[in-house]
Amino acid sequence: MQITSILDIVDGRLLNQPSISFIYSIKTNVKKVKEGDLFIVQNKEDINEALENGAFALIVDENIDIIDKEIAWIKVQSIKESITKLIRFQLSNKKLTAFYCNVVSYNLFEILRKTTSHTKIKLIPKDLSKFFRIIDDIEENDTIICSCQKTLENIYPVNFNFNTKDYEIKNLIEHSIFETTFSYQDKYFSKIKIPSLYLKEFLDVYSFLGFDADLNKLKKFNKLKPIFVDKLINHTEHGRTDKFLLAQENKELMEAEIAYLKNKYKYAKILYLTLEEITDNTHIEFTHLDSLDDLKFFLKKNSFNAVYFVGLDYETLYEQVSKENNEPTLI
């Protein structure tokens, strides 16, 4: 790509008169920069390494010392907007099918998509700067999938809603709030690790993948995935306790999940915890913890069957329960 073309795309201006007039590829990860690349600078400390790796051009959004006059130094108003514009330009040359989907479907695509057999399906990263890692691999008639409609509108305006279908589910058995058996068409799903709340998203993704996926990988699905604990708030196995913890970092899913828990777990005592201020769900009584380190101390003092922790991901909550495993487990 010519430097002059890049200037037009990002609405940038040259800070020098370089001898370089073209670049081969675009990188945002300095470790991946090779000779001939354009490097988009998101951290000034990466500039020297990018030059050492052979960058032919750099995009910056602030005034900077030009330490190599041979390469092109391009100044823009916004790095974020420049990334969007460059991606949009590169995708505009290809005939693609583009979908936006909800965050649950996107998560299921991440888990179930096979890199070997679903090569025509490309997932757009939540951080657009990481899209340059795969953008050169996108081919004609590929399908791109994004979890944000606005982001997709900005990079590929002709797009469709992925989550539009309804499904006739039969023989539904809810073994627990996180394990389900059911039938759909001629297929029988036995004790799969997914809440009935998210069966629609599961079927959206699984059918789109041609019913070709390893369902054992649903163990990685962390929406409403329980962390079982004993009365000392140490890890324990399912069946050995009546206590479990749930984490949800995405507040968009909070209302539906809380309603689901209240409906399916009517007689349980559920505690709703957060480290943040929650104002959207005033009908839910949240307990605010000053620090995650207070978790075990708080739970040991309060009776509960379930804890729903808002603003925290599963891995962080799991690690926090693991941290203080110094006391003996008593069941």
Image (cartoon, rainbow, N blue to C red):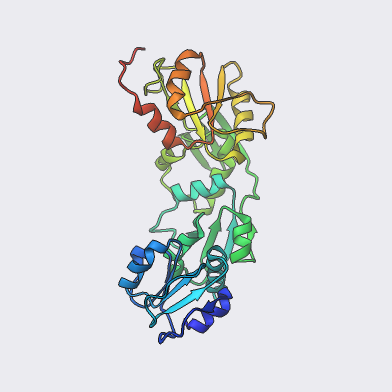
Q: Percent x, y for residue 139? A: 47, 71
| Front in this rendered view, residue 203 or 281 | 281
**Location of the C terminus (image quadrant):** top left
Residue 242 sits above or below residue 174 on the image: above
Residue 305 sits above or below residue 3 on the image: above
Q: How many marks?
A: 0
Q: Percent x, y for residue 72? A: 44, 79
Q: Is residue 203 left or right of residue 299?
A: right
Determine the residue positioned at 46% across, 62% down: 42
Q: Percent x, y for residue 40? A: 45, 68
Determine the residue positioned at 44% across, 85% down: 21
| Front in this rendered view, residue 309 or 259 | 309
Indicate the quadrant where residue 153 lies.
bottom right
Q: Is residue 180 left or right of residue 252?
A: left
| Front in this rendered view, residue 292 or 233 | 292
Determine the residue positioned at 51% across, 42% down: 187
Any part of residue 134 in sight: no
Determine the residue positioned at 44% across, 32% down: 317
Indicate the quadrant where residue 281 lies.
top right
Residue farthest to the right? 283
Any part of residue 34 in sight: yes
